[in-house]
Image (cartoon, helix red, strand yellow):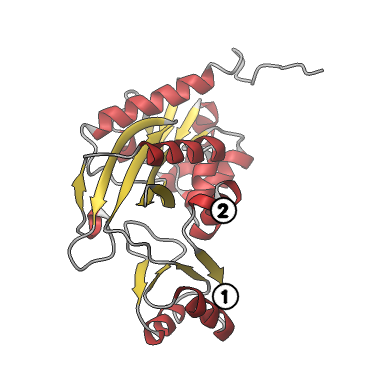
Amino acid sequence: MKLITFDVFRTLGIPGVRYIKPERMFDHIEEIRQADWLLFPEYWQVNSLLYGLGARIFPSPASYHLGHDKVEQTRAFLALAPEHVPPTEILGTSPASLAKVEARFGYPFIAKRIKSSMGEGVRLIASRQELLAHVAEETVLYAQQRLPIDRDLRIVLVGGELIAAYWRVTPLGGYRANVSQGGSIERTAIPEAAIDLARRLARELDIDHAGFDIAMVDGHPYVLEFNRLFGNQGIADSSKRIGAAVLRVLGAQDDDRDPDGEPPLRLTA
């Protein structure tokens, strides 16, 4: 396979990959056309590669499009598995919207920025003053009920293959379990229900490279979000294991194409 990567660090475990800087993409169009797979493009490149060049990218288009925007991601979860989504409101920032969120959740509740990661856009809103400060910076009010948890699960899947599953424990007095925000890692008693939910979402939404964040409340799993570019903390030998899993995904999809690179013809009645 001819592989080109636009993110050298995400493909350290994949041998024989050609690295092209994203900003140099248009200087290497012919080389890019000849590649079998384009790995880890930046988000701004995706439409040009998919629709302009008809290229195949990894992670999948769905991983990019749903992973880029928490609103679109949550709506996809609600369409597929509403019973596994925490009580959520996605509204504008009008006074009526603020009043609706206050009436439904009370204080405190969780508010999220639409495009953020590593817990940086998650806020615990404890008062009307904090709510007003939050919406002064946002055009969309994304609000969720605060779940009665002191930890959540990070479940990493590549092509449906389980790479890692561990608890992220919230630091004392905090509300974010992200390791980047001071959360600690525990690996005991990982619930199968959480892994099953992550696998179902990945399979049915065609998400092939993601770290899913799952909360457990009274034995019931709730999906909080997924991150396409998940952190590698907590994953032993991460580059090698993830690289091998990525190659298995690419190889499996190549097996479904004919020698000319086209999908096999399937006749239906």
* Image location (x, y in percent) of residue 46: 53, 45
Q: Residue furthest right?
A: 269
Of mark 1 and mark 2, the one earlier in the sequence is: 2
Q: Is residue 134 visible?
A: yes
Residue 20 is labelled as none
Q: Relative to 165, does residue 267 appear above or below in the rendering?
A: above
* Image location (x, y in percent) of residue 144: 45, 66
Q: Residue furthest top?
A: 259
* Image location (x, y in percent) of residue 91: 56, 72
Alpha-carbon span between mark 1 and mark 2:
19 Å
Q: Is residue 163 left or right of residue 132?
A: left
* Nearer to the camera, 124 or 158: 124
* Nearer to the camera, 44 or 64: 64
Which residue is found at the position 47% from the left and 33% from the top? 38
Q: Disc 2 marks which residue?
A: 78
Q: Which is closer to the viewer, label 1 or label 2?
A: 2
For badge 2, the amino acid type reads Leu
Rendering quarter of residue 50: top right
Which residue is found at the position 40% from the left and 33% from the top? 158
Rendering quarter of residue 182: bottom left
Q: Disc 1 marks which residue?
A: 92
Which residue is found at the position 28% from the left and 65% from the top? 175
